[in-house]
Image (cartoon, grey):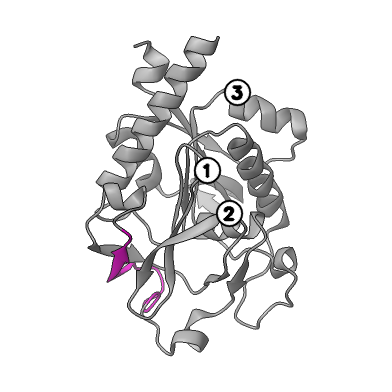
Amino acid sequence: MNATAARPRIGVTAYREPAVWGVWDEPADLLPATYADAVAAAGGVPMLLPCAPFDDAAVTAVLDGVAGLVLAGGADVDPARYGAAADPHTGQPRADRDAWEFALVRAALDRDLPLLAICRGMQVLNVAFGGALVQHLPDTVGSDLHCPTPGRHARHEVRVDAASCLGAVLPGRTLVATHHHQAVSRLGTGLAAVAWSDDGTVEAVELADRAWAVGVQWHPEAHDGAAVFAAFVAACARSATRSAVRA
């Protein structure tokens, strides 16, 4: 196996946020270190993908250089993308990040690159395939189970479909780290729900006609996600090997 296949390069989308370090106070491209650490621990090489201005050629160049894609968590998806008015609880749109990630996810799946979509990432995946979101989950489920404390991950159990791709690496019920106030309301075309919390919230989705395309509403990079990242990075290594053989 060549070096690329042994340690596949994996693109991870990044935030663009105000930041302060040293004597500087300006916008920065950043990502919680837990994402890169989780990819590296599973045997991949994380490559951050900031939402800088781009065109189709940039998307192609990025995907030519990676064997898989992680859509990271973050700000709310613009409700206009699924034909809804903004709820008072929905955050300000991040048009630059939305545009970048929607372009990446479609192009990556057109190539059948392995995809792991986390929290916001799962919502991007769902909307990209024509789905819609609940904009403030406590109004629907009647509790703050999924996001009880700002800045801290809560924990709750989810039930995983044993027949799914995700079910092959997780038990039927598993404890997950959660921090979100939005969720899937209408599934995108071709997506299947494969995990649920006890209140009925969709906690994971898959695209069955792709080699490995999984979205999880929780944060496997934060707690107890080694099995998920191991399965994803293994799929990326297989993808890199296939690409090397074709080349």
Residue picked out by circle 2: 190
Q: Of the residues tagged 2 and 3, which is closer to the observer?
A: 2
Q: Position of residue 107 (x, y in %)?
A: 65, 37
Q: Which residues are magenta?
A: 146-161
| Residue at image location 74% in from the left, 40% down from the top | 53
Question: How busy is the neighbourhood of tag 1: few (under 14 within 10 Å), some, or many (20 plus)?
Answer: few
Q: Amino acid at mark 3?
A: Asp
Q: Are marks 2 and 3 in contact (CB under 8 Å)?
A: no
Q: Is residue 171 above or below residue 106?
A: below
Residue picked out by circle 1: 209
Q: Is residue 2 above or below residue 209?
A: above
SS class, disc 1: loop
SS class, disc 3: helix
Say which quadrant the C terminus sits in: top right
Q: Determine which quarter of the picture holds residue 233.
A: top left
Q: Amino acid at mark 2?
A: Gly
Q: Nearer the viewer, residue 18 or 179?
A: 179
In the rendered image, is residue 91 in sight? yes
- Marks 3 and 1 sit apart, C-alpha to C-alpha, by 21 Å
Q: Position of residue 229 (x, y in %)?
A: 33, 42
| Residue at image location 66% in from the left, 49% down from the top | 102
- Using the image, tell me which numbered label, if any, was put on residue 64: 3
Q: Amino acid at mark 1?
A: Asp
Q: Are marks 1 and 2 in contact (CB under 8 Å)?
A: yes
